[in-house]
C-alpha cells in the first residue's frame, strides 16, 4: 500500500531485484526469450544418442546457442551434466559389438577396418534374437565354464572380454564430455566457463533419459 507510512521504496526495490536475480539463477534460459526473441528453455536439455561419442545435430545446434549466450554474457558459467543409464547402454554396447563380430564372421570380412557404411547398417538391422546370432554366441561361449547357465548378454560379454568392453564403454561416455568441451572451446569460449561432468543420482531424477542437463553454475 503506497499510502502506508511504513511503505519503503528502497525495501520494495531490493526485494524485486533479489527475486529477479534468483529467477535468473534458477532458470537462466527462460530469460533468453526477452533478450533474443526466442524461448531458451529448450536449451536446458541436450539429447544424447546411445553408443555415440558425439552429439546429434539438434543438440549441437543447442550447444552453439549456449555458446552464443556465453559470449553475450561474459559473467555466466554453465555446467553440463551427463545423464545416462549406464547398465542399459553397456548392454547395448555388448550386443552391438557381438553383432559386429558375428557379421564379420558370417560374411568373411577381413577386419573391422574393412567394414563400410552399408555393412554397419546391416549390423544394426540384426535382431538380438536372430537365430544365427544366438547360435554364434552359444557356440563361442562353450569354452567358458558354466556359460550354459548364463543369459545371452553375459555370454557375449565373456566372448568380447569383460575388461576390454568395460574400457571401451568408459572411453565412450568420457568422449561425450570431451566433445562438449572441445566444441565450446572451438567457438571461442574459455574452458573455465564450463564444467562437464556426470550427474549425481539426485540430479538425474526418476526418469533417466540419455541427455545432458544444462545448469547455471555462477553469474
Image (cartoon, rainbow, N blue to C red):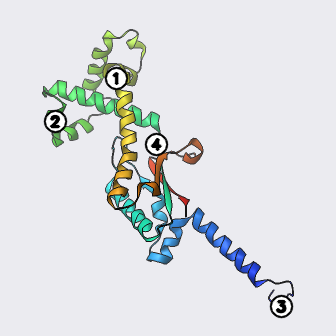
Query: Residue 101 appears at what percent x and percent y?
Result: 23, 27
Res 187 quadrant in image: bottom left
Res 111 quadrant in image: top left
Report if the CB atoms under discs 3 and 2 are less than 8 Å apart.
no
Q: Residue at x 57, y 42 (%)?
A: 201
Q: Eyeballing the image, is 162 above or below 115?
A: above
| Of marks 1 and 3, the one in the foreground | 3
Other-residue count near label 2 (Cα within 10 Å), few / some / many at <14 / 14–19 / ≥20 = some
**Would residue 87 appear left or right of 183 to someone viewing this image?**
right
Q: Secondary structure at mark 4?
A: loop
**Is there any visible trace of residue 82 in the rendered image?**
no
Which disc number belongs to residue 84?
4
Precedes in sequence: disc 3 or disc 4: 3
**Badge 2 is on which residue?**
115
**Badge 3 is on which residue?**
3
How far apart, in angstroms, are the residues tagged by discs 3 and 2? Answer: 80 Å
How far apart, in angstroms, are the residues tagged by discs 1 and 4? Answer: 22 Å
Res 22 quadrant in image: bottom right
Amino acid at each position: 500500500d503506497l499510502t502506508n507510512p511504513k511503505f519503503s521504496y528502497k525495501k520494495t526495490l531490493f526485494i524485486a531485484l533479489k527475486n529477479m536475480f534468483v529467477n535468473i539463477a534458477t532458470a537462466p534460459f527462460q530469460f533468453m526469450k526477452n533478450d533474443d526473441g526466442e524461448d531458451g528453455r529448450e536449451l536446458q536439455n541436450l539429447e544424447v544418442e546411445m553408443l555415440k561419442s558425439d552429439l546429434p545435430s539438434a543438440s549441437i545446434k543447442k550447444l552453439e546457442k549456449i555458446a552464443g549466450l556465453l559470449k553475450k554474457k561474459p559473467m555466466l558459467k554453465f555446467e553440463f551434466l551427463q545423464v545416462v543409464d549406464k547398465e542399459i547402454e553397456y548392454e547395448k554396447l555388448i550386443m552391438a559389438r557381438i553383432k559386429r563380430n558375428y557379421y564379420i564372421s558370417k560374411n568373411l570380412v577381413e577386419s573391422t577396418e574393412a567394414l563400410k557404411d552399408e555393412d554397419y547398417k546391416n549390423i544394426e538391422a540384426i535382431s538380438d534374437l536372430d537365430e544365427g546370432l544366438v547360435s554364434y554366441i552359444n557356440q563361442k561361449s562353450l569354452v567358458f565354464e558354466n556359460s550354459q547357465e548364463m543369459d545371452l548378454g553375459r555370454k557375449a560379454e565373456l566372448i568380447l572380454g569383460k575388461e576390454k568392453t568395460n574400457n571401451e564403454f568408459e572411453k565412450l561416455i568420457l568422449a561425450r564430455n570431451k566433445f562438449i568441451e572441445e566444441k565450446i572451446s572451438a567457438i571461442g569460449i574459455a574452458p573455465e566457463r564450463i564444467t562437464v561432468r556426470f550427474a549425481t543420482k539426485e540430479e538425474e531424477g526418476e526418469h533417466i533419459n540419455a541427455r545432458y542437463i544444462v545448469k547455471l553454475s555462477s553469474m
